Image (cartoon, rainbow, N blue to C red):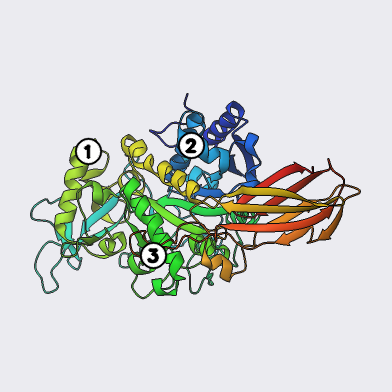
Amino acid sequence: MSFFPFDRYIKHDELTTGLQAVAAAYPNLVKIESIGKSFEGRDIWCATVTNFATGPDTEKPAVWGDANIHATEVSPTTALTYLLEKLVLGYGTDVEITRALDTRAFYLVPRVNPDGAELYLTTGRSIRSSTRPYPFDEDALEGVKREDVNGDGLALQMRFKDADGPWKKDATDPRLMVRRDPTEQGGEYYRILPEGFHKNYDGVSLKVQGNKEGLDLNRNFPGHWRTESEQFGAGPYPTSEPEARALVAFITGHKNICHAVTFHTYSGVLLRPYGTQADDSFPAEDLWTYQTIGKKGTELTGYPAVSVFHDFKYHPKEVITGVFDDWCYEHLGIFAWTTEIWSPQRQAGITEGFDDKTKQGAFKYTTWGRNHEIEDDLKLLKWADTQLEGKGYYNWTPFDHPDLGPVEIGGWDMLHAFRNPPPQFLEREIAPFSDWLLWQALTTPRLAMHQLDVAFLGEDTWHVRLVVKNTGWLPSYVTKKALERKYARPVVAEITLPEGVSLVTGKERLEIGQVEGFCYKPPANGGYSADTTEDRAKAEWIVKAASGTQLTVTARHERAGVVRETVTLG
């Protein structure tokens, strides 16, 4: 049984129907709820996935996944519907999936920005995020607006001759444009613009219209948020937009979330914080853990795991702020990642950024996008010619433009070849991420009962001792940043006293500290190992009660889960 297609992209109604169908078929594993409304009033759906028979989701450590916050980045939606389907179909047959859903929870939001995605999937229009006009609700008075002008159903590029143009045809393949040499003169030169009509062209000044929908929802989160003058698309204040606000409200209301992955396109890379500062600003343990999680991600997906600040800045002197993963880590102490699905460059065999001397490094899209050699373009063109069935790169075709005169229209269909995987490659590309998120879920802290002892002291007096342990890899607090931010409360132990029972010593509710995982253990063969029991915590009470009385003891941690047990005295 399949609830979603994995070889095409779906609109909001089909996504809604699929989510509701999964919940109806697996009510013991899936709950669907709307966590907010988009600017245009569409539901922002969240799927909670766990075995509800083993306890509510809020009493289990959890992993968050979201997708499609940017309008044209629709393949991330498929990554999460694939994960959802894999979890429900694998429960009861796949050992790891069964263990994860019995003891952990997943919160999956396949489409954060349904308005932008619907606009793209319905009309082909490309905007950054929300459909809300920002910062001004007015159309541009002049310039090229990207649209289909020759009636072929595509919005490509236009090239036209201009003696002052910076481009010329490549001698190897004239479909490609190469830079004019800095001192070169006397050749045939071109300018390139997006395909579209030029509003109010004066015959001299060529301009390109920006979209009046100027918001970037992934600049609207509270972490390091800056105003529009410093950060384009940030919105008037943090979480000013309902889509970002819905995510912030849900995540801060679910302190059991330990990991978060937000899915974007494109570059074929796993990005981690910080975006604003160097790695030496991390608590060392958090950096080491991030690196371990990233190494596993690379192993499972083939995508390199890199720092945004060190490896993914769009300009070496600029940073981006107000982004989801920085906010999750910096404010809440959650290990958060941004996954950029798909790299056409890597499909074509381009590995720019790899250091042949050290055998380290990764493809750096931001560097490649600023400048690269023509050999890379030739590789991409060969890939398009042989793999994209004629739908990636289009030969230049003469057209008499009503504003600009004779032009040629052609080049890359960026939305088909670059922005998302072409449909025939979609499932292959997104499938491995399910294994990474499943692995992350199983690394979370997990509170369990170690020991519950009752000793009779005489005269209806009893000593009760509760010992709990963390069976997970991560510590109960998850990150040192969470401790620094005072976001992770210690384990709380409670004893419930029936009527007629009195407490002689101890308190009904005790904070008994954090419990470590085993992620920071040094190598066993290095001579530094000492396996002490910081993974355990205990609470003790002396109560006065008649033999046969039943007492309930509970230990809970907001991130590591809940254990409770009833004991009979005597």
Q: Earlier in the sequence, mark 1 or mark 2?
A: 2
Residue 209 shows up from this direction: no
Please state the horizontal and vertical placement of residue 368, each as a whole percent of the image: 25, 61
Tell me the SS state at disc 1: helix
Please state the horizontal and vertical placement of residue 118, each as a whole percent of the image: 50, 43
Please state the horizontal and vertical placement of residue 350, each as a whole percent of the image: 20, 53
- Picture quadrant of residue 193: bottom left
Along the line of sight, the residue nearer the viewer: 409 or 34: 34
Q: Which mark is residue 308?
A: 3
User: Which residue is drawn at the image coordinates 83% and 40% (left, top)?
Assistant: 548
Which residue lies under the disc numbered 1? 387
Distance between the Cα atoms at labels 2 and 3?
A: 31 Å
Whether residue 330 sits left or right of residue 493 in the image: it is left
Q: Earlier in the sequence, mark 3 or mark 1?
A: 3
Amino acid at the residue labelled 3: Val
Which residue lies under the disc numbered 2? 97
Amino acid at the residue labelled 2: Ile
Distance between the Cα atoms at labels 3 and 1?
A: 31 Å
Whether residue 224 sits left or right of residue 253 in the image: it is left
Q: Earlier in the sequence, mark 2 or mark 3?
A: 2
Please state the horizontal and vertical placement of residue 63, each as a whole percent of the image: 53, 49
Q: Residues within 10 Å of mark 2 (few under 14, many from 20)?
A: many
The furthest residue to the right: 500
User: Which residue is drawn at the image coordinates 30% and 48% (left, top)?
Assistant: 302
Quadrant that contains the C terminus: top right
| Front position among marks 2 and 3 | 2
Distance between the Cα atoms at labels 1 and 2?
A: 35 Å
Along the line of sight, the residue nearer the viewer: 153 or 503: 503
